[in-house]
Amino acid sequence: MKTTLDLPDELFRQVKSTAASRGILMKQFITEALIEKLATPHPAPIPKPWMKFAGCMANDPEMRAELHRITGIVEAEFGKVDPEDWK
């Protein structure tokens, strides 16, 4: 399957250079990197503190849609925060 990736310039140069130094195509390098990443066990997801209070309402079909909407807004806003700002 073909896809398009938007990589930072420096990362692209590192990937291309590393693949070339190993004598493989960039496509193969990226494929191997993704396979390795997917094979690595991941820690449990970080709990969403705001769901502690709202989670009990998820059984109500009307509330489920609203919770989904609110969760999307909250996650989008938290995604704008630089993790370094939390330190």
Image (cartoon, rainbow, N blue to C red):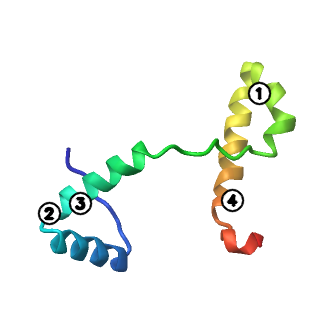
Looking at the rendered image, the disc whose residue lies closer to the viewer, 1 or 2, is 2
Query: Upstream in the sequence, badge 1 or badge 2?
Result: 2
CA–CA distance between discs 3 and 2? Answer: 6 Å
Which residue has dot 4 on it?
Answer: 77
Under tag 4, what secondary structure?
helix
**Amino acid at the residue labelled 3:** Phe
Under tag 1, what secondary structure?
helix
Front-lying residue, 51 or 68:
51
- Residue 23 placement (x, y as % from top left): 12, 68
Which residue has dot 2 on it?
Answer: 25
**Amino acid at the residue labelled 2:** Leu
Residue 86, label in figure: none
CA–CA distance between discs 3 and 4? Answer: 34 Å
Which residue has dot 3 on it?
Answer: 29
- Residue 59 placement (x, y as % from top left): 76, 19
Query: Upstream in the sequence, badge 4 or badge 1?
Result: 1
